[in-house]
Amino acid sequence: MKFNKIVVAAALMGVTSVSSAWFDGPGFGNGNGNGYGDGNFSFNMNARSNVQGYGNGYGYNNPYYGPAYAPAPVMTEEQQKAAAENYKKMQEQQKAAYEAQYKERNEMMAKMEEQRKSSFEAQQKAQKEMMAKMEERRKAAMEAQQKARESHIAMMKKRYEVK
């Protein structure tokens, strides 16, 4: 215990002496321990670390005493065949899923094209009907205008008829 106190006291003295060396500036005091000072303080610190770790542990401070790098387990011929079959099944499932999506996409595209065509045809039909109505109105307006003109001319002839 006494040794620890000595070490702590020595460390405090070292920190005090180092910190006073870092202090740079004027200080003022009254000789009774009271005073103030003005100065600059600078502190730089740099650290670097590179850590790597591998292995398997049991956790809870139970170390693992096995090899650091275990070789891959050797598969039996039966396991290799099963793995190859599973891989082939997975590929077939992926292919089937892709084909189903592709088929659904094509069906959707066909529906969209059909909707586009029917919409375009409906627009064309509406435009033709509108043009026909406009032509009918134009003809009716022209006929009304012609009748009004003829009526006006008849009225003018009657009014200014020379007798």
Image (cartoon, grey):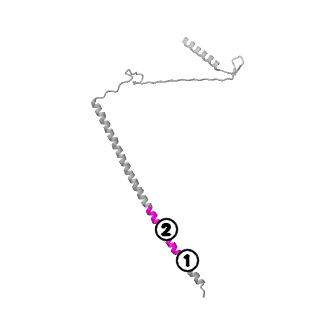
Q: Position of residue 36 (x, y in %)?
A: 69, 22
The one of 32 and 23 positioned closer to us in this rendering: 23
Residue 154, located in which quarter of the rendered image? bottom right
Q: Position of residue 29 (x, y in %)?
A: 71, 19
| Label 2 sits on residue | 134
Q: Position of 115 compared to 12: left or right?
A: left
151 vs 8: above or below? below
Q: Secondary structure at mark 1?
A: helix
| Label 1 sits on residue | 149
Q: Position of residue 84 (x, y in %)?
A: 30, 34
Could you tell me the amino acid type at mark 2? Answer: Met
Question: Cβ–Cβ below 8 Å for labels 1 and 2?
Answer: no
Q: Where are the magenta residues, as a range?
A: 124-149
Q: Earlier in the sequence, mark 1 or mark 2?
A: 2
The one of 149 and 60 positioned closer to us in this rendering: 149
Label 1 – label 2 distance at C-alpha: 22 Å
Residue 4, located in which quarter of the rendered image? top right
Q: Which mark is residue 44?
A: none
From this viewpoint, which residue is outermost toward the right? 30
Residue located 29% across and 31% down the image = 80
124 vs 160: above or below? above
Q: Residues within 10 Å of mark 2 (few under 14, many from 20)?
A: few
